[in-house]
Amino acid sequence: MRIVDVCAFYSPHGGGVKTYIEQKLAIGPALGQDITIIAPGDEAGVDRRGPHARIVYLPSPRLLVDRKYWYFDDEAALHAAITAAEPDFVEASSPWRSASMVARWPGAAPRALVMHADPLSAYAYRWFEPLFPREAIDRGFQPFWTHLRQLGGRFDRVVCASRELRDRLAEGGVPHCVLHPMGVEENLFSPANRDPALRARLLALCGLPESATLLIGVGRLSAEKRWPMVIDAVTAASQRHSIGLVLLGAGAQRKTIVRRIGGNPHVRLLAPERDRQRFAALLASADALVHGCEAETFCLAGAEARASGVPVIVPDRGGAADHADGGAGLTYRAGSAVSLADAIDRQITQGVVPPPQRVNTMRDHFADLFADYAAVLEQRRSVA
């Protein structure tokens, strides 16, 4: 199949979507697919990754709230780019405006909306749930629910990577929701990557001895990731235990997070580790991964930690919660620093050790996803 992914969230500067797209460009052709990513950027261009993989950039404005990202603003140009790629199947990777543009594309190819974002959890629930029950918030955001239901009716698949998101959308009346959990990079994440010397160096960076507990946090420095809450919870748990926290990330909230760390010598904010092998070693050398975001559609960091044999401490809502299943970690009440501090205390006191985990790889994910697309395409052709 010729698969065209209209990916408004792609940025060469990093992030979970970039990791996903890079894997798709590498794995898709190996599985017999031809992959075109259409992404917004400063200038028009084509980044060729081989005879059957490429990124096509369309000139687009940058987002005001985060200058590392762009957005599609020329629907005619986007439609022309999709048509020029001669797709058998089209994906939209954002539930915002670009999905509506893809829905209005006049071509005959079937299409899927891949939910790389959960705006209700990232914004509406996070802002208003301390004040109102979720049912009331949903009533207040009926225009967005209507938008999602209309999109579901115009797409053949609404692809979700977590059970909670799939079930919540389906219960809200969004049709064609399917579950396709993502996975980790093949042959990279493993408990064998654990390095006691690296662990000791990270604890020393936090001003602590090897007898302390090393927590690691990984992700964008943005409001929905709730890093200030994580820092507060670790600080509270540190009243009972010797804990070092290493955060790997970059983003718009860096100054806010630095202020929240204050003079705490046991919390260190580091730049993202772009070398994937070194990152796998950093992750495997931690004693637990701590995560604050209940708006994850999958939580790649949680999957990578699970594959590395590292217990996870994650909120009880969103994609991150899936990674605590089967004894792989602990959950806490989403949005609560007190509950998170208690979970950290339980992890250290009980010494939760995950049993050996079989974690899906990205090859598994794409093989299942493309098989689903092929079935949709075959059904479409048989009806025609």
Image: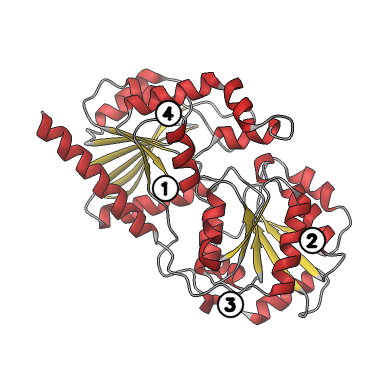
- Going by the numbered disc 1, the residue's amino acid type is Ile
From what the image shows, is residue 74 above or below residue 190? above
User: Which residue carries the number 2 mark?
Assistant: 267
Q: As rendered, which of 192 and 168 lies closer to the eye?
A: 168
The first of marks 2 and 1 along the sequence is 1
From what the image shows, is residue 63 above or below residue 301? above
User: Which residue carries the number 3 mark?
Assistant: 194
Q: Provide residue 229's location: percent of width, then percent of height.
A: 76, 48
- Going by the numbered disc 2, the residue's amino acid type is Val
Q: In front: mark 2 or mark 1?
A: 2
- In the rendered structure, the answer to whether residue 244 lies left or right of residue 355 reads right
The first of marks 2 and 4 along the sequence is 4
Element carrying mark 1: helix
Labelled disc at residue 21: 1
- Going by the numbered disc 3, the residue's amino acid type is Arg
What separation in Å lies between label 4 and label 1 (alpha carbons)?
29 Å
User: Which residue carries the number 4 mark?
Assistant: 173
